[in-house]
Image: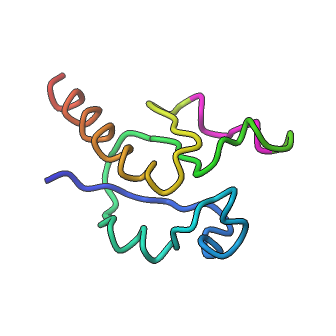
Amino acid sequence: MAAFLLINGSDLNLLGSHEPDVYGGTYLDDIEASSKTIAAEIPLIELHLNNTFAREEFPHSSHCSDIAQSCLFGFGAYGYELALPVANQHMAAQEGQ
């Protein structure tokens, strides 16, 4: 089984209670409970709960999109579920090299 490192952004402790119409109603504890995290050499997948490009200007730029293997925007908490098979696919491709 592969190991993953999950790094959460700022204010995710407010998930579920702060602007649920924008960020969804899922709490960070629920996401963390379903995501086992271990530090490892893994592909970088940038994940945003909402579509940052549909918001005010400042979140339109990213400090890691240019080096990320994949980027997911606007899927809410479901984005975490989408990211895991993508990460597995990237890791399998790395192992096959």
Q: Quadrant of residue 85?
A: top left
Residue at the limit of the structure toward the right, as seen here: 57
Picture residue at 61% right of the left edge, 70% below the top: 15
Q: Position of residue 67 (x, y in %)?
A: 53, 31
Q: Position of residue 89 (x, y in %)?
A: 25, 33
What stretch of residues is rendered in magenta?
Answer: 59-66
Q: Nearer the viewer, residue 34 or 4?
A: 34
Picture residue at 34% right of the left edge, 44% below the top: 42
Residue at the limit of the structure toward the front, as seen here: 21
In the rendered view, does 1 fall on the left or right side of 90? left
Picture residue at 60% right of the left edge, 38% below the top: 64
Q: Nearer the viewer, residue 65 or 72?
A: 72
Quadrant housing the C terminus: top left
Predominant SS of the magenta segment: loop
In the rendered view, does 51 fall on the left or right side of 91? right
Picture residue at 60% right of the left edge, 72% below the top: 16
Q: Position of residue 62 (x, y in %)?
A: 69, 39
